[in-house]
Amino acid sequence: MASSRSFEVKKIGSWVDFVRLVRLCPNLLVSQLLTFLLLTSCFTLPATDSFAQNKMEYTNPILAGFYPDPSVCRVGGDYYLVNSTFAYYPGIPVFHSRDLVNWKLIGYVIEGKGVESRYDTLGVSRGIFAPAIRYHDGLFYVTCTFVDAGGNFVCTAKNPAGPWSKPVWLPQVSGIDPSLFFDDNGKAYLIYNSVPPEGKPLYEGHRTIRMRGFDTERLRVNDDERILVNGGTDIEEKPVWIEGPHIFKVEGYYYLICAQGGTAENHSEVVFRSKSIAGPFVPYKDNPILTQRDLEPDRKNPITCTGHADFVETQYGTWWAVFLGCQPYPPYGKDYYNTGRETFLAPVTWEDGWPTIIPHGHEVAYHYPYPLPRDDNFTGIPHGGDIEYTDNFDSDTLNLNWEFLRAPHEKWYSLTEQPGCIAIKVRPETVSDKMNPSFIGRRQQNAFSSASAAIDFWPKVENEKAGLLVFQNETHYYFLCKSTENNGPVIQLFRSDEHDGHLVLLASDGFWSEHGVGEVFLKVELHGDLYSFLWSVDPGFGWHRFKDSVDAAFLSTKVAGGFVGCMYSLYATSLGKPSENTAYFNWFKYKGINESDIK
């Protein structure tokens, strides 16, 4: 609602100001606005809080680090967003925001519910793929695919923070990326990526977008499957990997948006529309509506791999898109990034009844005007821009932002055994195995960042190790740890063998002090393409630079493969042998700088 404060005179000084005026006056014709601007050099508007806040800018990505495949919905003035989590547990984080920029993690869709065993033996890039969140008639719905562990499912909740229902499986749906659409006539539909017609691909990457009716009472699909898109925007050009579909309705048209081109540099978002939900869906002549593949790969601070979008209309009638993208670090042309696929936000513009996110040849910007009045009451941990936080483990519950590698079958950590720290049992499982190790991780959210921890741990035998892990997948990680050699404490740095994941020793430091049986401090620094590993017995007297110039590209998606990003993790292992030992982590600190701030 507009403020009752006095009017202000605002001067048009740039094209950006004009665009803002168009957004503020959506019912005026552009010709009327242009005539107005020619007749006068200023305009008068109520000095509303909304207008004042729109002069502020936010920083992309809004969810930094490994937060791919975003889906968003609005309920009144509240926004909710979910992401893929693959083999990490709990699955499908649910974020809440009131301004589309500042997001607070409020819960998870997949936690407990008897699904823990489904995570066993999954590779880190398998599991939870591309959830979609929708709201209808007092109920939230999340549809998703549990790859290699059950297929497609739907969960529901009255409160998006949970509890969520147990997954209701949809065995009739063959494919991935299911998304619900609720029509204004009361009917519901499930849209998803599926196999080519009759299961016979005409080329590699040939897929279809299909639709079935959906029974909201019984939470199951009807049998009336229909192909909406075969191949992609133009099957004669052999488009690949049409996926991530969402349908929404505007002024009598049904719009179908999809990702196309795969998840790497050729990724894009395309749009179709139809007057009927059953089709035919006609592709936009100016597709794609989002891509960065037509830009120079060695441009400064690039954002690449953009696609897999979802749209949301604000309560003020403006449209915005969330989508995934990646941030390579120098040398930019090699497309190395360790942070994985992240969540970005950009405005949607409409022309002749078609939406566009980023015009052809234009870069996704790191900074846009705020889409809504900024939520000055936001109290969550920042997930975008420059990020800094400390966890002192002074609560009896684990912060929601920590995740496990696959689902635990037992409680092997404690926040109450020794108040003010987290106690982690040293267990035989390793991160190279496809089970649940003693691993608690948080995302590496910036290409220029550091993570540090205080650890109180006395290893009894040489196979007992605990410390900080930088983890990409089962065969690509670095492990900075405390262990023992020749009955004395030692700091070790390992790299994984890229074939079998076994530990390869890079450096070792023996030491002895009154801290030898107590607290030691470990630190990892990332400077774009290089890691540094440090340790100390007292950071007040400085850090020992244990190993500098360690190859970061070894943990990049380009080298390691897969769909995830790196995790900074607290990790303890006895390398396959039984152990009764425990490692105590007294705090964990993270600090990161947004890529666009690096000059």
Image: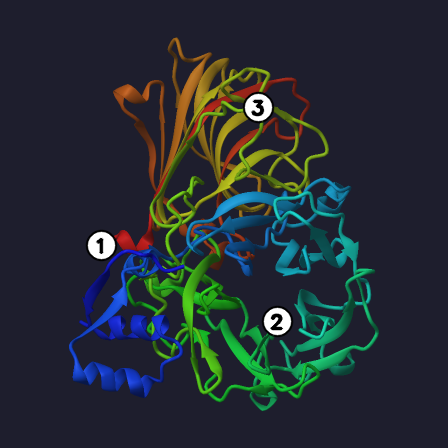
Residue assigned mark 2: 245
Callout 3, which amino acid? Asp
- Can residue 425 be seen by looking at this rendering? no
Q: Secondary structure at mark 2?
A: strand
Q: Which mark is residue 306?
A: none
Task: Pinpoint residue 198: horizontal percent, then vertical percent.
Answer: 78, 81
**Vertical placement of residue 32 versus 495, above or below:** below
Between disc 3 and disc 2, whose residue precedes? 2
Instruction: Please identify the quarter of the rendering in which residue 545 is found.
Output: top left
Q: In which quadrant is the N terminus drawn?
A: bottom left
- Asked if the residue at tag 2 contacts the one at tag 3, i.e. Cβ–Cβ closer than 8 Å, the answer is no
* Colour scheme in use: rainbow
Please state which of residues 576 and 192 is positioned toward the viewer in this rendering. 192
Residue drawn at (50%, 13%) of the image: 487
Residue 396 is labelled as 3
Residue named by callout 1: 599
**Quadrant housing the C terminus:** bottom left
Mark earlier in primary sequence (2, 1): 2
Amino acid type at circle 2 is Pro
Who comes first in sequence, dot 1 or dot 3? 3
Q: Is residue 185 above or below residue 381?
A: below
Q: CA distance from mark 2 to mark 1?
A: 38 Å
* 490 with respect to 563 (left or right): left
